[in-house]
Image (cartoon, rainbow, N blue to C red):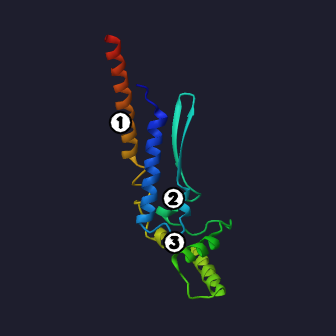
Amino acid sequence: MIVSLVQILSSHGQAVVKDIRANLAATGTNATGKTSNSIQYEVTEQGSITTLLVYGRPFVMTVETGRGPRRSSENQNVRQRILEWMEAKGVGANMDQVKKEALANFLTWRINQEGTELHKKGGRKDIISNVVDQRLIDDIMSEVLSRFSNAYMDNVKTAIG
């Protein structure tokens, strides 16, 4: 039996992506679906090093940390993302476009000054942190050790006869 570290890590990568996407949906943090759709995994091999990378769009961790006050004048398209969020959540649905944009401008200004409510409350740990944690590392290590040792013992049994 040949044990593949790539297969083991791919299996865990699929589970991590599924769990994070489920947490985004369950916590109501999935307004447009863009963050959920951006969650991906990749397994790479370089020589003897095999790596599992789970990633999402830039600033994906703000689903847990919130966004703090603006620290630079760099444009991060906050206003556009707020307009998309308003549309997805039905915020300002009874307003004309000019009033919606005015509200988006105000919310952008407010977030830039104070940060989001989630940031002010200290964040949360129930979307990504509870999936990508020490338990995940322990599970991967346990599976790798178990599968490789079982394969080794199978080879010893075959060689002994």
Q: Position of residue 147 (x, y in %)?
A: 37, 30
In the image: residue 34, left or right of residue 7: right
Residue, x 57% and y 28% (percent of image)?
47
Up-down: is 63 above or below 8?
A: below
Q: Amino acid at mark 1?
A: Ser
Q: Residue furthest top?
A: 160
Q: Position of residue 20 (x, y in %)?
A: 45, 56
Q: Is residue 90 visible?
A: yes
Residue, x 44% and y 50% (percent of image)?
16
Nearer to us in this view, 128 or 112: 128
Location of the N terminus (image quadrant):
top left
Question: Mark 3 to mark 2: distance in Å?
Answer: 13 Å
> Label 2's element?
loop
Residue, x 61% and y 75% (percent of image)?
83
- Nearest-to-viewer mark from 2 and 1: 1
Q: Amino acid at mark 3?
A: Thr
Q: Position of residue 113 (x, y in %)?
A: 58, 75
Question: Mark 1 to mark 3: distance in Å?
Answer: 39 Å
Nearer to us in this view, 3 or 35: 3
Say the numbered circle drawn on residue 116.
3
Q: Amino acid at mark 2?
A: Met
Q: Position of residue 128 (x, y in %)?
A: 44, 56
Say the numbered circle drawn on residue 142.
1
Q: Residues within 10 Å of mark 2 (few under 14, many from 20)?
A: some
Q: Earlier in the sequence, mark 3 or mark 2?
A: 2
Q: Residues within 10 Å of mark 3 (few under 14, many from 20)?
A: many
> Label 3's element?
loop
Q: Earlier in the sequence, mark 1 or mark 3?
A: 3
Nearer to us in this view, 8 or 132: 8
According to the picture, the residue beneath numbered tag 2 turns out to be 61
